[in-house]
């Protein structure tokens, strides 16, 4: 646990309680892993979305990274994680992982989905692998959440301060 992450969160990640211990050991034990129990990723966003996405829908997580959010959506019809990186990821019984770019997933697999009952999430995903990934998500899914932060660190600290208690 790094000091800076402790300072920002001051406690465990809000989704930490959902992580099976054996999977946490497997994911955290890999080389160069940059998440830990205080910061699993931007799980606040996934937790919020889990309350508004119907549980009989499929969730497609474009740029899922280590996919701790697989456990946030474990009661949904299916959770599909898509990421080009080669790493150990979290998985629930309804999880399928695709190790490929978002553009490749859309080209080869999106056609098999019922888009009326599929919700795509593309959150904190930079324009890597030569693609504007947020635009791809918006153009190919009708139910979709895309987000990438912009602004100064000071503005973000001020915005989060009431929740996290961190200092400006
Ligand atoms: C900052 S992480 C975000 C993880 C997660 N979405 C979250 O909000 O916690 C960005 C992830 O996007 C993935 N990524 C970036 N461009 C991609 C692309 N074109 N296709 C697939 N994955 C991509 C990276 O490999 C990385 O795991």
Image (cartoon, grey):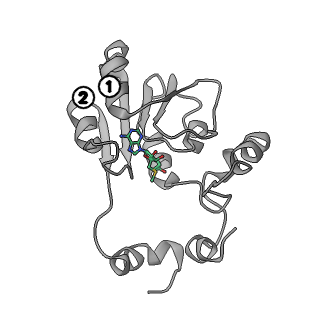
**Local crowd size for mark 1, using a 10 Å CA cut-off: few (<14), some (14–19), many (≥20):** some
For label 1, being within 8 Å of ligand 1 is answered no
Residue 126, image x, y percentages:
34, 51
- Give whichever of discs 1 and 2 has the lower sequence position: 1
Give the farthest residue toward the top. 112
Q: Residue at x 60, y 56 (%)?
A: 14
**Count of residue discs:** 2
Q: Nearer the viewer, residue 163 or 129?
A: 129
Query: Which residue bears the numbered disc 1?
Result: 106
Residue 106, image x, y percentages:
32, 25
Residue 136, image x, y percentages:
25, 36
On screen, residue 77 versus residue 90, left or right, reads left
**Nearer the camera: disc 1 or disc 2:** 1
Residue 133, image x, y percentages:
29, 42
Q: In the rendered image of this protein, does residue 117 appear above or below residue 20?
A: above
Q: Residue at x 70, y 67 (%)?
A: 1
């Amino acid at each position: 646990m790094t000091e800076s992450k402790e300072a920002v969160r001051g406690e465990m990640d809000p989704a930490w309680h959902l992580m099976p211990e054996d999977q946490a050991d497997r994911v955290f034990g890999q080389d160069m892993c940059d998440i830990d129990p205080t910061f699993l990723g931007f799980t606040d966003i996934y937790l919020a979305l889990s309350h508004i996405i119907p549980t009989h829908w499929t969730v497609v997580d474009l740029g899922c990274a280590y996919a701790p959010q697989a456990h946030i959506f474990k009661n949904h019809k299916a959770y599909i994680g898509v990421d080009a990186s080669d790493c150990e990821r979290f998985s629930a019984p309804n999880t399928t992982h695709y190790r490929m770019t978002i553009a490749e997933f859309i080209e080869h697999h999106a056609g098999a989905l019922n888009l009326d009952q599929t919700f795509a999430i593309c959150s904190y995903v930079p324009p890597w692998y030569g693609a504007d990934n947020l635009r791809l998500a918006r153009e190919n899914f009708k139910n979709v959440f895309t987000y990438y932060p912009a602004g100064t660190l000071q503005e973000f600290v001020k915005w989060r301060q009431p929740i996290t208690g961190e200092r400006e």
